[in-house]
Image (cartoon, helix red, strand yellow):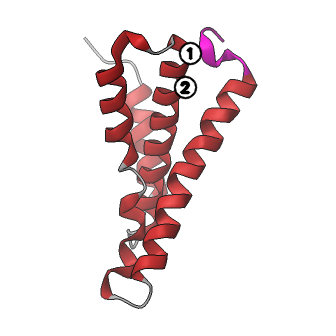
Amino acid sequence: MLGELNNPRMAALSIAGALGGMLVPAALYLMLQAGHPGESGWGTVMATDTAFVIGALALLGPRIPQSLRVFMLSLAIVDDFGAILVVAIGYSSHIDWRARAARVRHRDMPRRS
């Protein structure tokens, strides 16, 4: 509702950039590892760009516009969230969605004093 990402176009740009940041490294990895034993590790390369983005933002500091900083950080967050989902779903043998839903419901309940 507030801030730089309240514009759907800005948020969509971050999401599209994050999808590219996940798909391009995975595709490159698959091209280089095709037929090799490490081929199944394609999901692990999806989140490696986040450290680079945050490091670049820290080095550039106040010399970059605030809108670029917000865009890059939102891109990194969406990218990491997507990569976590890919690793959780793609590399696990089973996800107990009922237990996950129960944990979320339990966390949202008010605590007793």
Mark 2 lies on residue: 71
Location of the N terminus (image quadrant): top right
- In the rendered image, residue 68, in percent from the top left (x then y), is placed at 53, 21
As drawn, 9 above or below 22 = above
For the residue marked with disc 2, what is the amino acid?
Phe
Q: How many marks?
A: 2
Displayed quadrant of residue 4: top right
User: Which residues are drawn in magenta?
Assistant: 1-7
Mark 1 lies on residue: 67
Q: Circle 2 sits in a helix, a strand or a loop, which is it?
A: helix
Q: Circle 1 sits in a helix, a strand or a loop, which is it?
A: helix
- In the rendered image, residue 41, in percent from the top left (x then y), is placed at 36, 72
Left or right of residue 44, residue 26 in this image: right
As drawn, 90 above or below 105 = below
Q: Choose between 101 and 55: the one closer to the eye.
A: 55
| Circle on res. 32 | none
